[in-house]
Image (cartoon, rainbow, N blue to C red):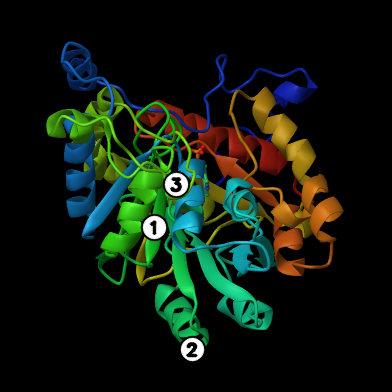
Amino acid sequence: METTVQDTDALAISGGEPVREETLAYGGQTIEEDDINAVAETLRADLLTTGPKVDAFEKVFADFVGTEEAVAVSNGTAALHAAMHAIDIGPGDEVIVPTITFAATANSVTFEGGTPVFADVDPDTLLLDPESVEERVGPDTKAIVGVDYMGQPCRYDTLRDIAETHDLVLLDDACHAIGGRYKGRPVGSLADLNTFSLHPVKNMTTGEGGMITTDDAGWAEKMRQFRNHGITSTHHERTEEGSWYYEIPEAGYNYRLTDFQCALGMSQLGKLPGWVERRREIAGRYDEAFHSMESIEPVERRDDATCAYHLYVIRLALDQLQADRKTLFEALQAEGIGVNVHYIPVHLQPHYRKNFGTESGLCPKAEAAYERILTLPVFPRMTESDVEDVIRAVRKVVSTYRR
Ligand SMILES: *Cc1c(COP(=O)(O)O)cnc(C)c1O
C-alpha cells in the first residue's frame, strides 16, 4: 500500500508543497518539570560539583545496568578516554573498533597513544563483524570495542569468546544503547567496560555527560582519579580529614560531572524505560510502513537483542532507485524531515588516512553500506502526526524516484 499520498504530488525539492512546514529534527531530548525541579533543587544546595548527587547518580546507574561500579564523567568521549586509560592503552597497543561509529570511539584510542584498528561491519545490522575482528587480531591487540549501533547490542557472546581466546579486554561503546538488552541482559553489563554519552541527542541526558560501568573496582578507582587531575582524594575528603595534602601518582584530566547534572541524570533515568518503549513503538510503525516498500530495507534487528532505538536507519536499494542517497537526503530535508547519515566510515576520515595509513577498501561492507544509509527521526516527544509525516515523506520521495 503506497497510495496514501498521490505518487504524482510534486516533491518540495522541485517546487511542490512540503509534507511539513517546520523541519522535524532526527532526535531530541525530553525535559519535563520534574527534571527542571531536580536541577533547581541541587543549584540551591551547598555543593555544585563533587558532592552527594554524583555518588547517588553513579549508584542508581550501576543498579540500572547491573554492575558493581559506575563512574560519572563530563561526556561520552571522556568516558571512552577514561576506559582506555583504565586498561593501560599506550603506544604500540592496538584496539579493534568498528569503522561505522562516531569518530570518538577511535579517537579515544589515540588519546593514550594507542592505534585504532578498523574492523568491518555486518552489512545487515551495521554492527561489528566478529569475523573481521578475528582477522584483525594480532600480537599487539589489547582490546575490542563493540559499538551498539542504533541501540542494538553487538553479538557479545561471540566477541567475548574472541576476547578470551586472545586475552583481550572487551569494551562496549554503548552510547546509543542505554535501555537495550542482549539475551535478557541489560546493556551496560555486557562488556568489561561499558561507556555512555548523556548528550541531549542520546536516549537520556545531563546536558553534556558520560558514564562508564564495570564490575572491576580497581578500574573504577583509576577512572575516578583520572577524571579529577589524577589526584588520589577529592577536595571534600581532604576537608573532612582536615588535611591539605594530596598526591598525583599519574596526571589526569578534569572530566568531572557536576551535581546538578547528576540530579538531572537521576530524574531522567527514572523515565528512560518509558522513553525507550516509545522509541520502540515508533520504530514498529516505521517497520510496518516500510515492509511493503521494496526500495527500502531498514537495518535488521536480531531476535536475541532488544534495540533501544537511539537511531532508526534505513538502507536504500539503490538499484531500484533513479537517484543516489545525496538526492534522497536533500529531497527529504526539503519535505521538512531532518534526516541524517550515521556514519561516514571513520577510516575514511583524512586524519586516519594521513596519520594511520587507512584507505578505502579496508572495510568494504561498511563502505558499501555507507552509500545507502539514511537516519530517520526517532525520539519520545514525536507525536503520531510527526511519525505519519516521516512515513508520508519517505513514501512520496521514494515513489517519485522509483525506477
Ligand atoms: C555520542 C557518541 C559518543 C561521544 O559522546 P559525547 O558525549 O558526544 O562525547 C561516542 N560514541 C558514540 C557511538 C556516540 O554515539
Residue in view at x 45 percent, y 73 percent: 155
Tell me if label 3 and label 1 are in contact, CB under 8 Å: no
Residue drawn at the location 65% of the way across and 76% of the way down:
140
Q: Is residue 110 visible?
A: yes
- 270 relative to 83, above or below: above
Amino acid type assigned to the residue bearing label 3 in the image: Ala
The residue that label 2 is drawn on is: 165
Q: Residue at x 78, y 53 (%)?
A: 352
Quarter of the figure with residue 237: top left
> For the residue with label 2, is its CB less than 8 Å from the closest atom of ligand 1?
no
Q: Nearer the viewer, mark 3 or mark 1?
A: 3
The mark nearer the N terminus, 2 or 3, is 3
- Residue marked by disc 3: 79
The type of residue carrying mark 1 is: Asn
Q: Which mark is residue 194?
A: 1
Name the residue at 34% across, 36% down: 204
